[in-house]
Image (cartoon, coloured by chain):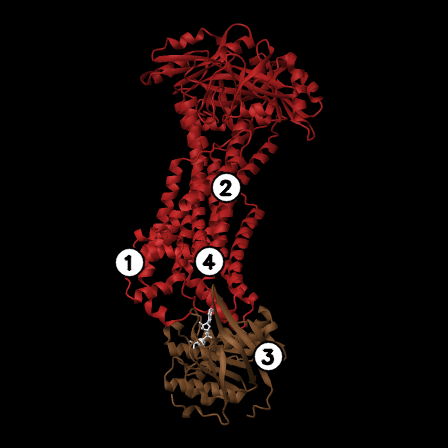
Amino acid sequence: MTALSRKLARELWKLKGQIISIALVVATGIMTVVTMRGSYDSLVDAQQSYYRQTRFADVWAPLKRAPDTLRDRIQTLPGVAAVDTRVTLFATLDLPGLDAPAQARLVSLPEHGRPALNDIRIRSGRYLAPGAASEVLISENFAAARSLRPGDSLRAVINGRARDLDIVGIAISPEHTYAVPPGALYPDDKRYGILWMSRKVLGPAYNMDGAFNEALVALSPDANPQAVLSRINSLLDTYGGLGAYLRKDQPSHQILQSELDSNKVMGTAIPAVFLGVAAFLLNLVLSRLIATQRTEIAVLKAFGYRNREVGLHYLLFAMAAVVVGAVVGAGAGIMLGRAYVNFYGEYFDFPSLGYHLSPLLLAIAILVSVIAAGGGALMAVRRAVALAPAEAMRPEPPARFKPGWLERSGLVRWLPSSGRMVLRNMQRKPVQSLLSSLGVAFSVAILVIGLFMFDGVQFMMDLQFRVIQREDLSASFDEPRTASARHDFQNLAGVTRVEPYRSAPARLISGPLAQETAIQGLEPEGRLRRIVSDTGGVHPVPVEGVVLSAILADKLRVRVGDRLDVQILEGRRRTARIPVAGVVHDFLGVSAYMSREALQRLVGGPELISGAYLSVTNDELGAVKRTMKKLPAVAGVASPGTMLASFQSQLADSLFIAVAFLLGFACVIAVAVIYNGARISLSERGRELASLRVMGFRRREVSVLLLGEQALITLLAIPLGWTLGYGLSFLVTSAMQSDTYRIPFIVSARTYAISAAIIIAAAAASAALVHRRINNLDLISVLKTRE
Amino acid sequence: MNQSTAAPVLSARALSKTYRMGEVTVRALRDVDLELRAGELLVLLGASGSGKSTLLNILGGLDVATSGTVQYREHRLDQFDGDGLTEYRREHVGFVFQFYNLIPSLTARENVALVTDIASDAMSPDEALALVGLESRLDHFPSQLSGGEQQRVAIARAVAKRPDLLFCDEPTGALDAQTGKLVLNVLDKVNRDTGTTIAIITHNAAIGGLGDTVLRMSSGEIVERNTNKQRASVDDIQW
Ligand SMILES: Nc1ncnc2c1ncn2[C@@H]1O[C@H](COP(=O)(O)OP(=O)(O)OP(=O)(O)O)[C@@H](O)[C@H]1O
Ligand SMILES: [Mg+2]
């Protein structure tokens, strides 16, 4: 072993605290990528393979009723690769022990063989046996929520007639990964499930013998989706077509996609930012650490060691930290990734969800760390070897102080002498002080990024459940009912306010552009549901015309004052030309609002309502729910309270866990960077401090000199870090907007406060560690050796 | 040894070194001419700040002059770049620094090995340390050695590689008479046995008697040159 490698080994050992903390920075950078990006990629892979295996459709075309023979005509449409047809309907389930009635969507399966599109996967039990009329498969989430197993039976009211059904199997389908009850925003697995039955049974039971009420289409690879959609729509028009829609508008896929999109921020942009910040800090810390070896580098050079050899020596030093960090980061990252994907598995119904790490991803993460660390080390070595050895070997000349702005400002007169020394020292090395501050500032920044995700979710939840959904209960009818039905609600004890609403499926057309959505007809004077923007502002319900979500307005390329063709997809299917009365920036993509009265005029026919929002006194809430359950016309009852709970348990969970991971990572980086900074400045100034001690300065006085500087650097870093964090959060937000998911850009005061508090705590902890070292400064050996 | 016939291995012409610090300029060397012949032992005397270390650093390739030429055999050192100087030091030069500059994380033996590792015809570190009387302190770190002991490690480190040129900046500054003589004996022996060319800086005028040539510097200039017909023996030196 050469003396140089011994030096390497000894110094690595001596600086193990710093090496470990540097390795932690590397590990954290790699870990965010391996954990967050890796699990996100695994999730997307699982989705894709699930969709492929079940032949998930590209187009859904619900309609009133069409003969089976129409299937062949759809098949011949250009752009159509495969077609399947089925019968589907809603049924009420008779299940004990619930406040509100349970509902099911019944979906037909072919008696023989498997569906050509939208196949299901059996999780337990078996597929339907041919000819067995009472056999049913139920969706896994529903089965789990109601503790139903193959062998159990249940009673469903189909088309007004009660039927006893035997559960023979539990199944999942990408179409119902999220089973969202009609009128609700989120799944409610206790009250809503999917039942699959034989077409042979379901058809006759629903007057659909030899007929279907939904077609599914797979597109050929080169098809133009919009063109196929309009061909299908015009073909189905005469059969009561309810408006075909693409996969991206399919409710379960849409929720899944927005859930994936929300994880996309966590899975792509944020790991990239973290890795970048970690790399930057790694570079900063290593180059500063190696800069403290200036005299030793000069000695090596003086004895004839070549620049290359010296460079390699310090490169190995840096790589030791990277290797430890990479091993820890990859190992821990994979473990966390597995745990994370496991956690995903609890509510992503993917049959083959497992954590897979792409070697390329790992290689990139490690390479970034290697380049950052190596670059930092070599930069420092370069600077050191650029000096003639005689120059670099001299003990650093005593600093030349001259009066700077500090003296001129007259500020110093107010400071104690130790404060003056601290400030003068920083003024003497402004670049270094600034860089140290920048390092700490980046730690503050990633804390801000981690925390601002909380703010976004918090804000959306507040907005959704305090500003938008102000009702205590909402009730939706199984089909539009006469407006007098509102009185049934009004008369219930405890109900203090009723606001009926109308909802109608419609196609909005602007020149060649079209989009299907449900137009919401609201009460102009309504207090329970209003048109609310993403900042919480309330947009008035227009007397005439329609208010569109900004994303929808963009899609149709219309602005306020433009006119739209609206085709209602129910009743008489009337078409009208109406003005765009407003555009509202909201979070949920594609809403269209009108006044209920205007929508009624548009649809025509007698005045109908689709449901109502209710205010109910607290004491009566349970009773009102129970009563509603008995009303035959009511298909669904939802209360924001339960929605909030299910939102929190379903959607917010994964985000919270991810944010918790990130916060942990950010804390590690912050502590590592601050500790390293303090240690390095101790080694830079150890001799000076020891001399002061020898001259009679007390331990505390010497500590104040060093730690006072650290404290100032930290305090300076906090506002700088807030600014950086704000900027980076903004970049992350704007990089990640999608059709289905927008993160609100909110950075709360709480986030600023918490990030500062964590940094101050980390700084205090490092100060305590360094203070111990200052107390134990070996005065004799410092004075004896001349490095 | 008959120096007048020996060829110069190292010669400097009109060497000047100016340090510029803001408005103040320090002329550490002013037009210094110097020749070192093969096998010569040169002693440099002079007051503190007179430019001795500066001169030696330039001759040893640790620093570059502001103007003037330095020639080592057929090579012009002043025309070398950093890499060229590195190779010059690696191949030909041994150095004892005024401030020892031991690597604190390496033991005495390893500090010597640091240099022998990259030399082609070196002594073993143990052998070199035995020459300076430190055979029992091989595995001690610099912080466990006295100032004088550290200085001896630095000397062992310089002689161990058997350099062609050996530059010693106050090699006995921290030593008592007895150890000082031990060290000077080592240098004298190296010079006589292997013909190593040596330049020694010292404040101790008595050491001047050891050299073939004695130079005295003042304010960056060589103000006095003496040649000793007969070199004194180390034991005769009055410390
Ligand atoms: N890096 C430097 N910057 C500025 N001035 C310098 C530098 N190095 C040396 N000097 C100045 O050059 C002059 C000669 O310095 P040098 O170190 O050669 O003196 P010396 O003769 O070796 O003194 P000593 O016996 O005290 O070691 C001194 O005035 C010194 O202050
Ligand atoms: Mg000197």
Name the spot of residue A685 as percent of width and height, x first.
38, 62
For discs 2 and 3, the disc positioned in front in the rendered view: 3
- Residue occupying the far bottom of the picture: B230
Chain brown in the figure, letter: B
On the same chain, marks 1 and 4? The answer is yes
Q: Colour of chain A?
A: red
* Mark 1 or mark 4: whose residue is earlier in sequence: 4
Q: Is residue A349 visible?
A: no
For discs 1 and 2, the disc positioned in front in the rendered view: 1
Residues B214 and A55: in front is B214
Residues A388 and A457: in front is A388
Mark 2 to mark 4 CA distance (whole Å): 27 Å
Please give the residue where the numbered disc 2 appears in the rendered image: A270
Q: Quadrant of ligand 1?
A: bottom left
Q: Residue visible at 52% across and 10% down?
A: A598
Please give the residue where the numbered disc 1 appears in the rendered image: A700
Q: Amino acid at mark 1?
A: Arg
Please give the residue where the numbered disc 4 appears in the rendered image: A288
Q: Amino acid at mark 3?
A: Tyr
Circle 3 — which element? strand
Host chain of mark 2 = A
